[in-house]
Image: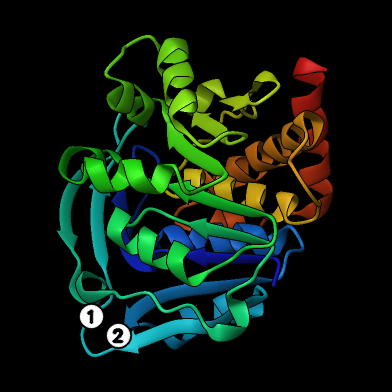
Amino acid sequence: MDVVVVGSLAYDSIQTPAAKGERLLGGSATYAGLASSACDASCGVVGVVGNDFRPEDRDLLAESGLDLAGLVTAEGNTFHWEGEYSGAMGEASTLNTELNVFEAFDPEVPEAWVSPKVLFCANLHPALQAKVLDQCSPTRLRMLDSMNLWIDIARPLLDDVLQRVDVVVLNDGEVRMLADDANLVRAAQWLHGQLQPGAILIVKRGEHGVLALHPSGLLHVPSVPSPGLVDPTGCGDSFAGTLAAHLSKGEGPVGREELRTGLEHAAVVASYTLQGLGVTGLVAMDRQDREARLQVVRGLTR
């Protein structure tokens, strides 16, 4: 298995200035898994859904190439999140969260998947991420995402798991929170210093692209210029899933240029996610157009 993704599968009710949808297929594992599979990586998803999970959504995941042997169906309803974006859509306002079956999620990685090339622990409670890390021995990389809630309520546990992974993917606000420093570069450098030797810190900056701290120095990759913003939900997860897929193809320590290439591809895939409601933009992604967008990103910096 190239990539194993552990995270949430959800139904999202979303309102943005451009569109509105009810009970759309979503969740961190959904976006990351679809992106990883679209980038030609074999990908397995570990998560939980309720018995209300629609057969057509399960079919979409399977037909997109995802291995669902790690997807458990529990009695009850699927995790439901309701959010609203306004203005430049930089951040969602959460209107309602119903954890449902996700509240009792106890991740169990199938035995056949315990040695993938890359393990990606998407946004979960740090205690669950630690359990997943205990179960898996990736042959190349451990990746981890988090959120401001865990910084607030589970900081010691989060600090522990951050030191157990090779690649940390956070947004700029989370990095500032962890470092307690409003200066992003200084905050990122501090946090990078807290990680294990050789680790990589990826700082997502929305429309301003991504800042990466590699052992050999800083990298910056821009976002794809696009006037067609519809729904940014899942952009960060599809970004991470794409990066995991590309890094699963290499061997040994991640080189600076390998990381740059992976980040460029990740920025392109994220640009498809935001141009459709829910996963529609990601699922409709065109390979030929994707290559054209990649050249646009490279033209901005190379």
Question: Helix, strand or loop at disc 2?
Answer: loop
The structure residue drawn at horizontal position 32% and vertical position 60%, both measured from the top left corner, is: 12
The one nearer the camera, 130 or 10, is 130
- N-term mark: 1 or 2: 2
The one nearer the camera, 241 or 165, is 165
User: Quarter of the image holding residue 260?
Assistant: top right
The amino acid sitting under disc 2 is Asp
The structure residue drawn at horizontal position 53% and vertical position 57%, both measured from the top left corner, is: 120
Residue 50, given in percent of the width and then of the height, sits at 29, 83
User: Would residue 282 be found to the left or right of residue 131 on screen?
Assistant: right
Question: Helix, strand or loop at disc 1?
Answer: loop
User: Quarter of the image holding residue 78?
Assistant: bottom left
Residue 48, given in percent of the width and then of the height, sits at 36, 77
Q: Is residue 269 above or below residue 130?
A: above
The structure residue drawn at horizontal position 50% and vertical position 29%, both measured from the top left corner, is: 203
The one nearer the camera, 159 or 150, is 159
Q: Residues within 10 Å of mark 1 (few under 14, many from 20)?
A: some
Q: Is residue 21 above or below residue 43?
A: above
Question: Do the CB atoms of the residues marked 1 and 2 lie less than 8 Å apart?
Answer: yes
User: Would residue 73 be found to the left or right of residue 40 on screen?
Assistant: left
User: Would residue 146 be found to the left or right of residue 76 on screen?
Assistant: right
User: Quarter of the image holding residue 209?
Assistant: top right
Disc ID at residue 52: 2
Residue 84, given in percent of the width and then of the height, sits at 26, 43
The structure residue drawn at horizontal position 76% and vertical position 16%, both measured from the top left corner, is: 301
Residue that numbered label 1 is attached to: 77
Furthest residue toward front: 197
Disc ID at residue 277: none
The image shows a total of numbered marks equal to 2
